[in-house]
Image: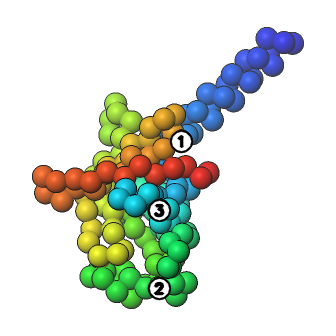
Amino acid sequence: MKSTLAAIFLAAISVTAMAQSTPVGLWRNVDDKTGEAKAEIRIGESNGALIGRIEKSLRKDAKPDAICDECSDDRKGKPITGLDIIRGGKKAEGKEVWEGGKILDPENGKEYRASFTPIDGGKKLEVRGYLGPFWRTQTWNRVQ
């Protein structure tokens, strides 16, 4: 009986650990320059590709009715809360990184190529945005 319970417990732990090694979930992004929490972003998966939207703005000066004035595509004029900022990105074969997606910075309306890498046992997410040969990395913290 004890060995059966131990096996079930270990299986549950491994399933939980595997579920955490993914970008899917709720994340808090932090400004890499100021250290201020900016937003909570919910990342999901649709047809094997990532999709992420802003669930909640955390900036002290955030306006509840703010819209994406700087966006130049279908997101222009849309509310920041609920805005899709991650589109695409699929798990690279044999790696713990999701590549090929794009991420939008709603503050300047620019969209960047992006990669997403779970680290620290899935408690954190390295989000790297690329513009040509240059990149910038933020580390997001898992909320859920």
Q: Is residue 99 above or below residue 60?
A: above
- In what element is the residue under mark 2? loop
Question: Which residue is nearer to you in this view: 118 or 30?
Answer: 30
Q: The disc labelled 3 sits on which kind of residue?
A: Glu
In this view, the mark in front (3 or 1) = 3
User: Is residue 60 something one can see in this rendering?
Assistant: yes
Q: How far apart are the alpha carbons under marks 3 and 2?
A: 19 Å
Q: How far apart are the alpha carbons under marks 1 and 2?
A: 29 Å
Sooner in the amino-acid sequence: mark 1 or mark 2: 2
- Name the residue carrying label 2: 66
Dot 2, how many residues are within 10 Å of its Cα: few (below 14), some (14-19), or many (20+)?
A: few
Sooner in the amino-acid sequence: mark 3 or mark 1: 3
- Residue 71 percent across, percent down from the top left: 31, 80
- In what element is the residue under mark 1? loop
- Residue 23 percent across, percent down from the top left: 47, 48
Quadrant of image for the N terminus: top right
> Circles 3 and 2: CB distance less than 8 Å?
no
- Residue 109 percent across, percent down from the top left: 29, 76
Dot 1, how many residues are within 10 Å of its Cα: few (below 14), some (14-19), or many (20+)?
A: some
Q: Residue at x 51, y 50 (%)?
A: 141
- Residue 18 percent across, percent down from the top left: 55, 34
Image position of 114 (left or right of 78)? left
> Circles 3 and 1: CB distance less than 8 Å?
no
Q: Residue at x 50, y 79 (%)?
A: 62
Q: Residue at x 33, y 63 (%)?
A: 103
Q: How far apart are the alpha carbons under marks 3 and 1?
A: 18 Å
Q: So how many labels did they put on this image?
A: 3
Question: Which residue is nearer to you in this view: 36 or 11?
Answer: 36
Residue 36 - label: 3
Q: The disc labelled 2 sits on which kind of residue?
A: Ala
